Amino acid sequence: MGRLFGTDGVRGIANKDLTNELALSIGKAAAKVLAGELGRKPTVLIGKDTRASGDMLEAALTAGLCAVGANVLSVGVVPTPAVAYLIGRYGCDAGVMISASHNPCEYNGIKIFQSTGYKLDDAIEEEIEAIILDGAEEIPEKLGGDVGNRLYCKTAVEDYVRHVVDTADVRFDGLNIALDCANGSASVCAKQIFTALGARCYMLSDTPDGVNINDHCGSTHPEELMQFVTDNGLDLGLAFDGDADRMLAVDENGQLVDGDKVIAICAKRMLDEGTLAKNTAVVTVMSNMGFFKFCEENGIACEKTAVGDRYVLERMLQKGYNIGGEQSGHVIFLDYATTGDGELSGVQLLKTVVKSGKKLSQLAKIMTVYPQVLINVQVTPEGKQKYNNDEYIISAVQQAEMDLMGDGRVLVRVSGTEPLVRVMLEGKDLEKITDWAIELQMCTGEIELMRVASDWKDYELIDCSAGEKLERWTREILIRPDPQVIWNSPRENRLWAQPGARYVRSRTGGGKWQTFKRIPAVWQVRYKDLTFNIKTMGFKHTGLFPEQAVNWDLVRGMIEGADRPVKVLNLFAYTGGATVACLKSGAQVVHVDASKGMVQWAKANAAASGVADGAVRWIVDDCIKFVQREIRRGNRYDIVILDPPSYGRGPKGEIWHLEDNLYDFVTLVQQVLSENALAVVLNSYTTGLSASVMQYILEDVLVRQMGGSVSADEIGLPVTETGGVLPCGATAVWKGKDGNS
C-alpha cells in the first residue's frame, strides 16, 4: 500500500482529505504518466457514484487531465464495474471511478483502472505518487490545441446493462425480487438489468439526493430489505453498496445470504457444469470457517489471500481461477468481469436459483455458518508496528487456538487502512469464542497507548505505592487509597511524610481523613479554562476525577467541530466536570444526578467557570426514569455522557447495579439519540468492567442500530516520580456519522 493510494485507490473526506487541489494533481500526474507510457495523447473515461462531491471532484480531475493533454470521456453516474467494462468497450486508455464505495456521503475516492479494466499496477501508482508527493518530475501543461477535450457518453448505462444481461443464459420470469440500490450507482441500472431478464422488481433506496448514499440502506444496512422481502412475500432480495461493486442477498425468509454463501452457491453450480476453473475458489482469510468446510465436503479447492479484493484478483489472475471474493459481497466472476460487480453477481445468483429449481433458502444450506465474533481494537501507529512481534499477544493467540482446536479458529490482524487491530474468532461454541475474543482484545489493547490526562497544572500525581496515591491539589498534599496501586515501590519522595491530610480506611469498613496541616474547607483547582470547587469528602473523594480531563477534551472537540448547536445529556453527572466543559464550548446541557447535594455542587462549579448562565437544566432524578420520560417526550440529544457508579440508589431508593443494569440502560440511551448524533461516552471505574466489555455493549446496541464506530481504552494519570502512568478507569466511545467527520 502506497503513501497516497490505499488498497482501493485514494480515499478521504471530500474537501478535507480529498481536496480539489489533490484531485487536480492526480489528474495532471496520471495524464503525464499515461502519455509517457503510450507516447501519445491518452483518453481517460470517468464515472462517478451519486455523492454530492462527485461533480466537484470530477471537474477538478478533468481539469488536471485536460491541462496535461489527456482527453476525457465522461459517462456520468455508473457502477464501478461499469467503468472497468466500458474502458475496453470504448477503447480508452484508462478509467477513473469517483466513489468511496460503502462509506458515508462525506467521503469520496478516486480509483484508477488501466486499459485492460484491471486496477492500476502498483508501479504506476508509485510513479503517480512520486510526482504528486515528491515532485519527482515536472508536469508541463499543454497550450492551444494540445489541451485535452472533454466528451460526454450518453449510452454508457445502456451498454453496461446489455453486457450484464448477456451473462445470463436463462430468464428470470416469475421471480418477484426486491432491489436495494443504497441510493447509489445501482439506482441508474439495477431495475433495467433484472426487468430485462423477466423478473418483477420492487425498488428500495433508489432515489439518490447526493447525501443519502449508504444511509441506513444497501449492503451495509440490509435490515429494511430483509423486512420488506418477508412482508411482501417475495422470492428474494438483493442489496448493493454505493458504487454497486458489492452485493448481499436476502432469501424468501428474510435471512441474509452473504458473500461467502453467494460464492459457495455459484461455485457449486459451476463445478457441476464443469465451468469452475481448476475446481478452485479464492477467498480471504476473513471468510467464515463454514466456507472452508463446504469446500472440503464438495471437492473444491480453496485458496486464501490477505484481506482486500485486489489480493483475491491477483491470485485469480496468477493461477487462472475464475471465481473469488469476500464475505462482504465483493465477488469476482472473472469469465465476465475484471473486478467485483454487485449486479452481475446478482444475475449469477439468480441464474443458479432458476437452474436449480430451488428457493434461495434451500441453496444457502449448502454451507453452515460458524458463529463469528469480530472486535476492532483501536491502536496507535506505534501499536500497529509492535503487533507482529509482541510475545504477549502471540502467546495468547496460541492458547486460544489450542483451546479451539478442531472446533474453531483465531485471526488477529492489523488493518491496512485504519488504526485498528481486528480480533476475529469462529467456532461451534459462541460463548467460548466470545470469551476468547474479549481476552484477546484485552491483550491486543496492551500495545496501544493509554489516553493520559497530562495537561494539568493545578493537579499532580506525585507518586503511588502500596495501595495509595500521593497527590498535589494546587498546594495541598493529599494521600488517598487506590485499589489499582498493587505495587510496593520505594517511597522516596519526602512528601510521603509531609501530607496535609491522609484518608485511612477502617478495618470495619469506611474510613476517615487524618489531618496533619490546615486544609481549606473548600478550595479551587483549574484545568485550562475550567475551574472546579473541591474538598475532602466524607469518603476518600475530593469531588473531582482529574483523569476525566481527557474525556472533557474529547467532547469539547466534538462540540466545537460540529458547526451546529449541540445538545448534551450528562447522566450520573456528579459534580458536573463534563457539564461545565460542555457548557464552556457552547453546548446545551441537561445535567442529571440522583443526589441533590451533587447537583448543587455542580451549579457552584458552573458559576466558578463562568457558565452559570449557560443553556443548562439541572435535574435531581433517577437516571433510568429520567431517560424513560425523555423517550416519551420525544426529546433527543447529540451527545450522551454516562459515568455510572458500580452501585447506587436514586432519590426515592431506586437501586442501580452496574453489571445488571448497564446493557438495558444503553438500549434506552439509544432511543434518546438524535438522528445525527455525535457520540455516546461511557466511562467506568469498576475494575471488573473492562474497556472491551463496554465496547462490546456499545457495538451490540448502537452500531447495530445506528452504524458508526466504537473505540475503547484505559484512561490514566502520569506519575511524576516514576514517569509511569496510573490506570484510572476505562472509557468506550461510540461515534456516529457526524462524530467521525
Image (tube, rainbow, N blue to C red):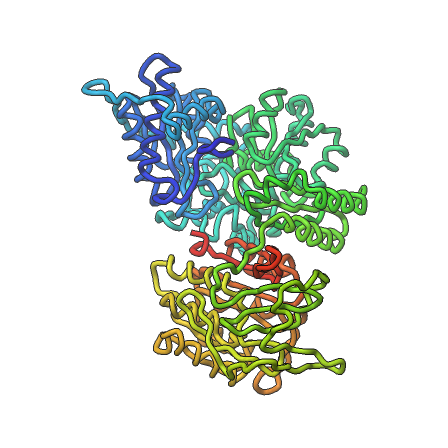
The outermost residue toward the left is 144
| Residue 153 coordinates in the image, percent (x, y) | 31, 28
Task: Give the quadrant of residue 414.
Answer: top right
| Residue 251 coordinates in the image, percent (x, y) | 60, 47
Residue toward you, 248 or 215: 215
Classify 629 as above or below 218: below
| Residue 618 coordinates in the image, percent (x, y) | 44, 80
Q: Residue at x 54, y 30 (%)?
A: 310
Q: How many marks?
A: 0
Judge left or right: residue 541 versus residue 67.
right
The outermost residue toward the front is 494
Classify 728 as above or below 390: below
Judge left or right: residue 71 versus residue 109.
left
Task: Give the quadrant of residue 98.
Answer: top left
Classify 68 as above or below 521: above
The outermost residue toward the top is 39
Task: Give the quadrant of residue 622.
Answer: bottom right
Q: Residue at x 20, y 18 (%)?
A: 145
Q: Is residue 367 visible?
A: no
Judge left or right: residue 638 versus residue 464.
left
Q: Residue at x 42, y 59 (%)?
A: 558
| Residue 422 coordinates in the image, percent (x, y) | 62, 45
Judge left or right: residue 40 versus residue 391.
left
Q: Residue at x 35, y 47 (%)?
A: 210
Residue toward you, 412 or 507: 507
Residue toward you, 427 or 604: 604
Q: Is residue 344 visible?
A: yes
